[in-house]
Structure formats: structure tokens, C-alpha cells
Image: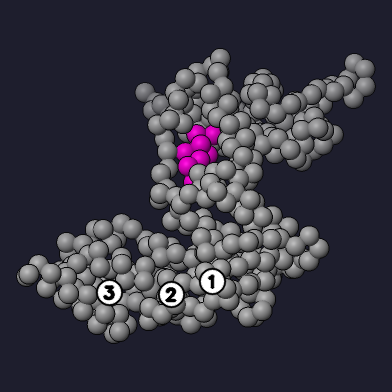
Amino acid sequence: MATLRPIPRPKGPRLGRPIGKFTQHRRLDLLREQLEAHAAGLTLEDLAQMLRITTRSVRRYLRELALVTELESIAVRPGSVHMWRIKPSERGRAVPLRRTQAYALLAARRVFEVLKGSALFDEIDVTLRQIEQVARRPIARAPVRGDGGGDARLEDRFAYVPPVARSYANRSDDIDEAFRAVAELCVLRFRYVEARAADGREAPREGKDRGVRVTCHPYALVVHGGAIACIARDVDRALSRVFAFDRMTDLEASEKERFELPPDFAVADWLQGDFGVAGGSRTVKLLVEFEPSAADAVRARRVHPSQRVAVAADGRVRASMSLPESVEVLESARSWLLGFGASVRVLEPRTLAEDLARELHRAALRYQE
């Protein structure tokens, strides 16, 4: 009796409903991309060949796409085949969103609460309300796996909670002025109250508690730790630095003066992870050793982009990072290390190790009183 051989699988592309999570969504995205790329339109046969599916499946995908983008079918000439295309009024303007994508955007809406009261916040809020309608849009079919049902209300149960934000409700005009200067590359002028120096002495001021006058080229606005910071080029002092919005007053964006954004500017160069926003050419190497009891907490959290971790055989962890020589950043790193108490030992720099030793000694004395 002859041995039965299994029927070989075809080597060509498989037609019909694809298998796998979100594969249908990827084909839907590809359909939209093809229609965007062919302004004159494509026939059902063209689309079927591009997506490697049947024309019947193309019609089903077109119905799905029509829920979020206006489509039209045009006959090239009477009695001929029809061409499908995105309406000219929709090209380059509509951004199709699946329900899962809408939920992901809504999860981060609390990030913008620091801007509450400003016109910028109102603009963002309008968009988020529209996205909310996408998330709540009723659907007549069974939802695709991972996409959620129309009545899931997942926007209330999937959320990102940022650090407690500062209240800038009484400074809405200043926020809008700063954002306009950044967006339109306008010269920005304001008064700035410098922070206390490292030795505790007051920074020099021009007027009673009003701060020094600053003329700058604002490169970027950053919301970090619930507060706003402005990365800018201080024109008078010929240096790039970070200005804390809390200490900026009398903001005024020029109507006529403009500047060019440096081609090598990258906001990522200024983001110091959990330690704030700062820049500078000089850096400090931080090398610390953690006891096994703190190892999991250190390995699970990347507090700085340059962080590198090495694990010893006995469970101890060494972490190294390169920090800018900034008072604010080093103070944040110091506070982070103090939170580990006796479970951490600073190896470099030596000055920081001695400072933490004195601080912990003072803390121990308080419990001996």
C-alpha cells in the first residue's frame, strides 16, 4: 500500500482573511497608503493585487476604511471600470484611527493638564474630544481582537498618570506667548529670577524680586515632572541653557524678529531622564554600587539615558551614567541616591560620596537624640 504524502503548501501568497493579531489592520493601513499614493485612484483588481487578497475582500476593506476616511468611486468613462480613491478634500488631512490607537492617545491626556487655562490646552482638548468620539463610535461588527468594544469605556480604565503638575492657571497668556515663540521661531523676551547658587547665596537681580532681563531664541518647550522648561539660546550671554517657566515673567514674543533653529539642535540631548532638563559640554561620571536588596529596583528602572548596569555574582549591582555638570541635575541624582539609604555606595565622584556620607551621618544623629 502506497504511503500517503501530505499536500504541499502553495509557495505563492495566500488569499483571503489573514491570520494573526492585527494583520487585518496592517492591510487596512496598506490600503490607505496605496490610495494616498495614487491620487487618480485604483481599480479593485489593482488593489487586490497590491494587497494579495481577492476583490471581494478589497470591497470589505474599503467599507472599513470608509468609516474613518471619505472615499469615492469614479467611472473613467461610461460603462468602464470604476476607480477608487480618497476624496481630494480628505487627502493629507484625515488621520484614520483604530479604536486601540484612540485609547492609547486618550491614556496620555493628563499630561497636558499642566497647560490648563491656555489657548494651547483648549486646542489640544478639542482634538482629544474628537479622538474620544472615535473610541466610543458604535460598530456593527464583532471587534477585532485587542480593539475593544464600542461600550468598553476603556478611556476611563487605561490611563497614564504623570507627576503632579504645577498650576499655571493664572499664567495662560504666558504659556501661549512662549509656545508661539517656539512654534514661529520668534525672539522671546522676559525677566528671569535665577535660582540660588550652590553655596546658598542669592543670585544677582536687576530689580526688586523681578529678575534679570533676558532676550533669547527659544528652541523648545518641555514638560518634565509636572513643570514647564524652556530650552533657549541666551542672546546677551551667548550660551544655550534651560529656563524654568516658574521663574520667567513678563513674557513677550517679538512680532518682527525671527531666528533660525540650529541644524544640530536635538531636544533629546537635553533630556536627562528622571533628573530633569539640562545641557552642557562638561559631564560628570556617576558610578554607584547597590546592595542585592535594591538590585531589582535599579535594574527595572532606567533613570537616565546613559545608564549602564552590571550585575555581580553575589547579586550586587553597579550602575554608571554620564551626567551634565548641572546643579539641578546633580541635586536630583543626589536625592535619588539618598532614597536608597544604606543600600547604596557612591564610588565616583568622590565629592558626591563624601557629601552623602555627611548627610547620612546627620540623619543617624537625629535618631540618637
- Judged left or right of residue 110, residue 49 is right
- Judged left or right of residue 261, residue 133 is left
- Residue 333, picture quadrant: bottom left
Q: Report, in whole angstroms, how far the alpha carbon at label 1 lies from the one at label 3.
A: 43 Å
Q: Report, in whole angstroms, how far the alpha carbon at label 1 lies from the one at label 2.
A: 15 Å
The residue at the point 70 percent across, 39 percent down is 33
The amino acid sitting under disc 2 is Arg
The residue at the point 54 percent across, 71 percent down is 208
Q: Residues within 10 Å of mark 3 (few under 14, many from 20)?
A: some
Q: Which residue is mark 1?
A: 208
Count numbered badges in the picture.
Answer: 3
Contact, mark 1 vs mark 3 (Cβ under 8 Å)? no
The amino acid sitting under disc 1 is Lys
The residue at the point 31 percent across, 67 percent down is 335
The residue at the point 57 percent across, 43 percent down is 117
- Judged left or right of residue 166, residue 188 is right
| Secondary structure category for the residue under label 2 | loop
- Judged left or right of residue 247, residue 1 is left
Residue nearest the viewer, comparing 178 with 13 = 178
Instruction: Identify the mark nearer the N-term, 1 or 2.
Output: 2
Q: Which residue is mark 3?
A: 288
- Residues in magenta, as a range: 102-112
| Secondary structure category for the residue under label 3 | strand
Q: Nearer the viewer, mark 1 or mark 2?
A: 1
